[in-house]
Image (cartoon, rainbow, N blue to C red):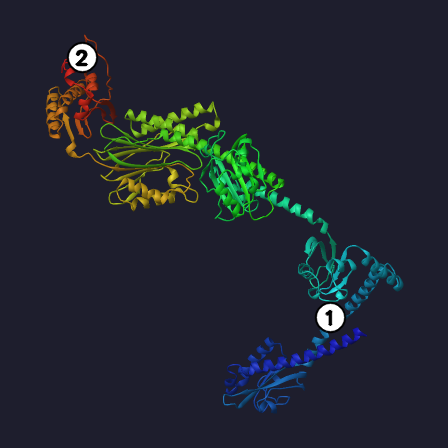
């Protein structure tokens, strides 16, 4: 019956809805066409049908209606789906539309039974100038309902089938859930359930989705202190219920063995939703049991957990750096306030220098941490001599921790400093643990833990925790101590290998800076080496790696550079010889410790000549130098890179620069321009910026560069060398081309004597003439053209004789019967230094003479050699 009634209602409703929809559509189509543009003009045209009939038919098809009829005010049609009906009178009521109204009706028209709407076409002045009618036939409207009828019938049949099947399934499920029990059996079962519910020693609550208490057994009422009339009341309004418990019950969230403290009870709560699918509007079932007797165990477990957490955190927070002081500060910070109210770390004085302490060493307070800063404890940095009666001295001597529960009753501690100890007790500090820092059998110091806020003194459990905490920190402390010692040794070695004072020379004004890396000493070095002819060599290098091995290798390379420079070789030849040396070092180290082998080194070698203002540069894998002109313009010198030292197989190339007087040549290592978060390119641009903004003074330039680029904690060594060029003026240089004939020797002696008189070096005339005579004579006899003589007046006097031969002269001792062979011996005796350097055109033999005063001090008498060999 319900299905039949529903079917009838659906049919009636469908017919009504379709009829209404047909009328609404007819009105909409008619009004749209009546208000279309050009309709009134078409009505006034000589043949309205010719214009309107195609438009009406197209609109009818697009709008889904059966007809659109346009007529005049007398009802004569201009359009119709059937052309034979055009010109005939419209079938329907037009009077309401002539009055300006929209009218709908159902009539028997040319197409059959029709539902149509008539709409007026109104001129701007409000006058009706035509009518438009649109509609659908009843046959089409009824067809819509008929097409829906099978769907409705099928839906009704499906609903009946589902209802029947659902009823059968629900009946079967209920029968299965009740196990076939009847009403009597069900009543008895609920009685037994109620008896058991109130007899168990575990609280049971049932709460609905609105937070109302549906059921509370006797145990729940007893544990929660609920009144007898609590059933049915809102949980938040139940008197006597603890607020934390009420919040948990109202939250409806799942809780498993959650501990809630209510009054003096410690309750364990389990809460689950009663709805099988966990919907938010479902209720909850709660069980509660009393675990007050577990409070002590829980407290102990929580204390153990906090201690384990403290030890775990200490493992990660202590020893983050290999710094003794920093490690002590980390230990003090970890202990406060989680273990003690104040913590102080006293280390033996040698430990701070990386050494092992001896017995009875004084201790320096290295770290202090506390909950307040106005405490009367010894301040940080104070050197303390603990009396033997104090817990600190006993612990340092025995290596065992000392527990002082009551400081006011400890006479040995009170005797240390009566005024300060009394102030400490008056401040509220009442208990102490002194734990020695012992690592690898060596006591490094003592850690003191002080308690003031808690009235309870430290106990044996606290003592064991303090011992374990300090034991873990002691390993990090000893590692930091060992690193400090090794770092100090490496720094000492490295600084001993680096130049302590730069040699005197007049080619460049030099400023330098060196800073070893914080994490480990590297192999960076720099050097300024005077060369013959007033020239100077500028060197900077970097050995790969860190530690003592890198520092020692740096010393070997620096010594080798000095030795090779004494040969007056070209920069590329010096780098080639250094490359061979590094390869031999690598080969020798392969037979020993593999970790100590030199993977390579970089080097930049530059030679500056103040006479020609030319600078010859070669580099082996090192960063290029920068040149800052006197006008402030700065450029990175573009020269061949060359492979790092130790790779072998590749030649080195040189580049020659011409520098204005006052130019600054900047040499550096990668530790200056490269660091974490900044690549070399960015560092080079910063270096250019610093040079551009600095004046010409090398020291100020060096400081400006460091202010802008020096890292706070360099990860690599930093070496910087700034050299401002100088020139040897034309008034201090004399040069002559020597004709290739023996008579030219006398002329050169005379010219040299006149030049020395002009320079005020008349006292050096005799020695200079002897040296020039020997050297020019040798060049004419054993050398080749062209021959040239040059005198340089700097701090002393330099005599240079150039010739086109590459034959090397050798110093020898002539026998008494020899007629010659004493020339170079005379040169060596009369000069301070002498030597030979080779040029692309030949060679240069040079000799340096000390200033007149220095020569007298040495006691050299050139006249003593007059009879040694005739000139």
Residue 129 in which image quadrant:
bottom right
Query: Please, is residue 349 above or below residue 253 in the view?
Result: above
Query: Please, is residue 466 above or below residue 861 in the view?
Result: below
Q: Quadrant of the N terminus?
A: bottom right
Residue 160 x, y percent position in the rendering = 79, 68
How many C-alpha atoms fall within 10 Å of the one at disc 1: few (<14), some, or many (≥20)? Answer: few
Residue at the spot of label 2: 820
Residue 840 x, y percent position in the rendering = 25, 27
288 to the left or right of 656: right
Q: Nearer the viewer, residue 150 or 579?
A: 579
Residue 608 x, y percent position in the rendering = 26, 33
Residue 703 x, y percent position in the rendering = 32, 42
The reply to whether dot 1 and dot 2 touch (C-beta < 8 Å) is no
Mark 1 or mark 2, earlier in chain: 1
Identified at 72% across, 57% down, the residue is 272
How many C-alpha atoms fall within 10 Å of the one at disc 2: few (<14), some, or many (≥20)? Answer: few
Residue at the spot of label 1: 151
Residue 404 in which image quadrant:
top right
Query: Please, is residue 87 above or below residue 708 in the view?
Result: below
Let me know if residue 159 appears in the view. yes
| Residue 470 circle label | none
Q: Secondary structure at mark 1?
A: helix
Q: Nearer the viewer, residue 174 or 715?
A: 715
Let me know if residue 323 appears in the view. no
455 to the left or right of 273: left
Identified at 29% across, 28% down, the residue is 570
Q: Nearer the viewer, residue 112 or 583?
A: 583
Q: Secondary structure at mark 2?
A: loop
578 to the left or right of 360: left
Q: Nearer the viewer, residue 45 or 525?
A: 525
160 to the left or right of 753: right
């Amino acid at each position: 019956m319900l299905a039949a009634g529903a079917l009838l209602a659906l049919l009636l409703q469908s017919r009504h809805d379709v009829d209404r929809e047909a009328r609404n559509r007819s009105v909409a189509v008619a009004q749209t066409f009546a208000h279309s543009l050009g309709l009134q003009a078409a009505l006034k045209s000589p043949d309205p049908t010719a214009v309107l009939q195609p438009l009406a038919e197209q609109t009818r098809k697009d709008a889904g209606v059966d007809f659109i009829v346009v007529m005049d005010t007398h009802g004569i049609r201009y359009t119709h789906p059937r052309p034979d009906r055009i010109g005939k009178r419209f079938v329907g009521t037009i009077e309401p539309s002539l009055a300006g109204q929209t009218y709908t009706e159902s009539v028997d028209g040319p197409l059959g039974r029709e539902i149509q709407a008539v709409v007026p076409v109104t001129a701007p002045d409000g006058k009706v100038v035509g009518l438009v009618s649109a509609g659908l036939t009843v046959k089409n409207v009824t067809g819509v309902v008929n097409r829906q009828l099978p769907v409705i019938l099928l839906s009704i049949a499906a609903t009946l089938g589902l209802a029947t099947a659902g009823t059968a399934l629900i009946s079967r499920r209920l029968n299965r859930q009740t196990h076939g029990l009847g009403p009597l059996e069900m009543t008895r079962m609920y009685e037994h359930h109620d008896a058991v519910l109130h007899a168990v020693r575990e609280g049971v609550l049932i709460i609905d989705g609105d937070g109302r208490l549906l059921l509370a057994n006797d145990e729940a009422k007893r544990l929660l202190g609920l009144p007898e009339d609590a059933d049915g009341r809102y949980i938040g309004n139940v008197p006597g219920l603890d607020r934390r418990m009420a919040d948990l019950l109202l939250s409806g969230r799942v809780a498993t063995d959650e501990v809630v403290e209510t009054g003096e009870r410690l309750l364990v709560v389990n809460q689950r939703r009663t709805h099988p699918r966990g919907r938010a509007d479902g209720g909850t079932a709660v069980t509660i049991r009393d675990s007050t007797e577990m409070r002590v165990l829980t407290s102990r477990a929580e204390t153990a957990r906090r201690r384990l957490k403290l030890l775990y955190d200490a493992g990660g927070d202590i020893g983050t750096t290999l710094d003794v002081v920093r490690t002590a500060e980390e230990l003090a910070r970890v202990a406060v306030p989680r273990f003690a109210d104040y913590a102080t770390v006293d280390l033996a004085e040698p430990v701070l220098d990386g050494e092992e302490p001896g017995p009875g060493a004084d201790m320096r307070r290295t770290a202090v941490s506390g909950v307040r800063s106005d405490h009367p404890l010894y301040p940080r940095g104070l050197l303390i001599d603990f009396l033997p009666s104090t817990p600190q001295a006993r612990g340092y001597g025995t290596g065992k921790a000392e527990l002082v529960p009551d400081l006011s009753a400890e006479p040995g501690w009170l005797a240390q400093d009566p005024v300060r100890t009394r102030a400490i007790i008056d401040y509220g500090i009442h208990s102490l643990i002194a734990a020695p820092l012992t690592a690898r059998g060596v006591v490094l110091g003592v850690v003191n833990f002080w308690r003031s806020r808690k009235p309870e003194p430290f106990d044996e459990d606290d003592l064991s925790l303090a011992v374990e905490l300090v034991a873990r920190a002691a390993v990090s402390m000893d590692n930091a101590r060992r690193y400090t010692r090794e770092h100090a040794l490496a720094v000492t070695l490295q600084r001993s290998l680096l130049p302590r004072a730069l040699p005197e020379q007049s080619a460049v004004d030099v400023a330098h800076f060196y800073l070893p890396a914080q994490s480990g000493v590297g192999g960076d070095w720099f050097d300024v080496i005077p060369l013959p002819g007033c020239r100077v060599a500028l060197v900077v290098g970097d050995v790969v790696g860190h530690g003592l091995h890198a520092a020692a290798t740096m010393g070997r390379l620096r010594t080798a550079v000095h030795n090779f420079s004494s040969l007056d070789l070209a920069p590329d030849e010096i780098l080639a010889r250094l490359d061979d040396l590094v390869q031999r070092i690598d080969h020798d180290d392969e037979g020993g410790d593999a970790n100590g082998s030199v993977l390579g080194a970089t080097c930049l070698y530059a030679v500056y000549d103040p006479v020609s203002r030319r600078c010859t540069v070669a580099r082996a894998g090192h960063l290029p130098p920068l040149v800052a002109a006197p006008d402030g313009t700065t450029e990175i010198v573009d020269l061949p890179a060359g492979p790092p030292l130790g790779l072998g197989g590749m030649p080195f190339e040189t580049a020659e620069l011409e520098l204005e007087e006052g130019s600054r040549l900047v040499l550096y290592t990668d530790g200056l321009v490269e660091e974490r978060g900044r690549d070399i390119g960015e560092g080079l641009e910063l270096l250019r910026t610093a040079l551009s903004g600095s004046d010409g003074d090398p020291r100020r330039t060096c400081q400006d560069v460091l202010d802008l680029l020096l890292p706070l904690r360099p990860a690599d060594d930093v070496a910087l060398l700034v050299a401002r060029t100088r020139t040897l003026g034309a008034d201090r240089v004399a040069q002559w081309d020597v004709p290739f004939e023996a008579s030219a020797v006398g002329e050169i002696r005379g010219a040299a004597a006149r030049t020395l008189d002009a320079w005020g070096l008349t006292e050096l005339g005799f020695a200079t003439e002897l040296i020039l005579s020997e050297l020019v004579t040798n060049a004419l006899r054993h050398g080749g053209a062209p021959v040239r003589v040059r005198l340089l007046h700097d701090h002393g006097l330099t005599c240079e004789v150039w010739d086109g031969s590459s034959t090397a002269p050798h110093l020898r001792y002539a026998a008494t019967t020899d007629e010659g062979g004493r020339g170079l011996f005379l040169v060596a005796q009369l000069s301070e230094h002498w030597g030979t350097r080779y040029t692309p055109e030949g060679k240069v033999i040079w000799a340096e003479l000390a200033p007149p005063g220095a020569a007298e001090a040495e006691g050299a008498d050139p006249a003593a050699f007059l009879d040694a060999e005739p000139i």
